[in-house]
Image: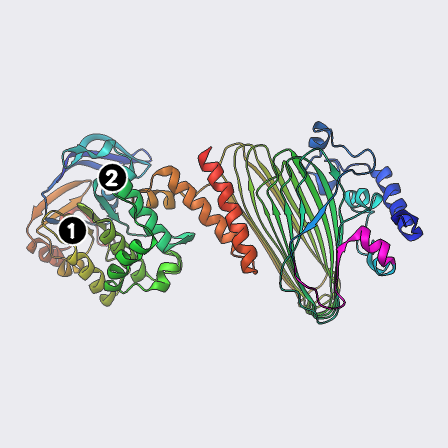
Amino acid sequence: MSVGTLSWLDDLRAKGRARFAETGLPSRKDEAWKFTGLNKLRALGLEPSGPPHGLSGLSGSVGPLPNGVALGSLAELLRRNPAIVERHLGKLIDVDRRPMAALNTAWIEDGLVLIVPDGVVLDRPIETTWASTGNETVYPRHLIVLGRAAEAVIVERHSSKGGFSNSVFEIALGAGANLRHYALHEESEAALVTTTIAAEIGRAATYQTFALTAGGGLVRREIEARLVGEGGSVRVDGAYLVDGRRHADTTVLVDHRVPHCSSRQTQKGIVDDHGHAVFQGKILVRPGAQQTDGNQSSQTLLLSRDAEIDVKPELEIHADDVKCSHGATSGRLDENALFYLRSRGVPEREARALLIQGFIDGALDEIDHEGVRETFKAAAAGWLAKRVAA
Amino acid sequence: MLEIENLHASVDGREILKGLTLSVPSGEVHAIMGPNGSGKSTLSYVLAGREGYEVTAGRATFEGKDLLAMKPEERAVAGVFLAFQYPVEIPGVPTATFLRTAINAVRRARGENELDAIQFMRLVRGQAKKLGISDEMMKRAVNVGFSGGEKKRNEVLQMALLAPRLAILDETDSGLDIDALKMVADGVNALRAPDRSMLVITHYQRLLEHIVPDRIHVLAHGRIQRSGGKELALELERTGYAEFGENAAA
């Protein structure tokens, strides 16, 4: 049975297609895309003009799964158990406000599905990889649903040599659930990636995401986290290492809809050469969402004159008993620290590398999962070693 | 060991050192005392090679080599060590990593083998213990969250590990209570050696009770105004720096 015969899925795709036909690719005239242009897509001949071609993979051994856990490819689950997919797919993402998600929805085909029943804890990270070697265009569609008090760890790994991946994650977390969602970008500069994440966080549930962007000509992560149950918490953290002519964009909306929730966004990065980093972080506190604790901060090291960072913090608060803060700094390596190291015999080049490494490690220490933290530290060290050798 | 002749140096276009001349023979401990703003810290930074300190005239040689022509790291390799008045915090870099990087950079430049992790720990543990520096402190980021005393002890530890020929101690007593001061002074005294000179820079006589110098020089208005034996410290303690033009408020 072909996936295409499900009428609800056809309707969903049609909605995405219609919306994308209206908007087209976002341009810098769109407020949310002011600092990020998609002209690299055109330059690389990757402009979307039809269905995607290529496959998004799922790998990593997760061992035997507990009863009731659904883990596998979306295409396969649509064949085996379309009803369970229908219950969730397309329910969390608003394609009207998110043009790249509309494009993804127009061509829903495959991706990762993880459905974890109540009370089930999956310790070992589940990996999705995108490792294209050519000029593929892929629109992976991922669906993560955790039941009450369920826990899981997801790791996206991007290591393509080229192509364009425009993925969407829809994430629904039941009461007390805990999802740790990590992303590692190590693509070459010819690979472009846009990821849209819509997460709905239930009562006392936790969603933590951390992305290390050490590769990719253009990487944009657009995250919308909605706190819909009291006591929920969200962390959107990341580290970006942007050199060459690369571009890394993290755009976040944390939507506090109910009281007693907390959110934190901590972004740290290094921009060198002609690199360009963007962090747009918004905290929205809806009327009645009292006792909200929201914080966002960004810290950027600029290592060259042509390096660029655009930070746009935004607080929109409609409740009176809340604690919200934001702070952003950008600057060069600490000259005092540099002199201190050199006065101890460390050559300037090595001293700079050590300071950069320290800054990165400080950012990666935010990662809760030890195995993931070590993997990401190794990736960051790899980026740094390449840079020092260059 | 250290010969300074008619040294003039400016910061942001303002002349701070105005013809300073000083000689520190091998194995001797000399103190530089002086009022605030006399140029004490400028002298230490000029000798260590900090950027922004412009030497406009004069010379400084270390064991016959032109010190001022060397990069900061080259001075360290040659055997010059500056214990900072305000040790710098380096978030994200563990103290042990910092020490090992420094030791191995110096060893490499001197043509010696680099130390592996085990050799390094063996070397550091003994020195650290003497200075009351715990393994836990070694894991913390350099100077981050350290107390004033911990920071200064960490400076002395670095000095012990790098085994310099000339140690410049810039206001090592500042911010220390008497117990911390004793600990730091003991650490420094343990490093006194016939082939090691020290330049102890301080505003107060207090430190010199614990690190007793061979000679004392009074620095004011950018020049050495007077030199003498260790008894000069006691005299300065009584009279203050008034004779050298410091007003009472300073």
* Residue type indicated by callout 2: Gly
Residue under disc 1 on the same chain as residue under disc 2 = yes
Specify the amino acid type for callout 1: Ala
Quadrant housing residue A122: bottom right
Magenta-highlighted residues: A62-82
Mark positioned earlier in the residue sequence (1 or 2):
2
Judge whether residue A78 is colored magenta: yes
**Image point (31%, 47%), residue name:** B102
Is disc 2 placed on a helix, strand or loop? loop
Measured as percent of width and height from the top left, residue B106 is found at 27, 43
Q: Who's the residue at 17% across and 46% down the image? A: B245
The residues bearing labels 1 and 2 have C-alpha atoms spaced at a distance of: 50 Å
Is A365 covered by the magenta stretch?
no
Q: Label 2, on which residue?
A: B111
1 vs 2, front mark:
2
Question: Between residues B231 and B128, which one lies in front from this camera angle?
Answer: B128
Circle 1 is placed at which residue position?
B242
Q: Is residue A99 visible?
A: yes
Report the quarter where the N terminus of chain B lies.
top left
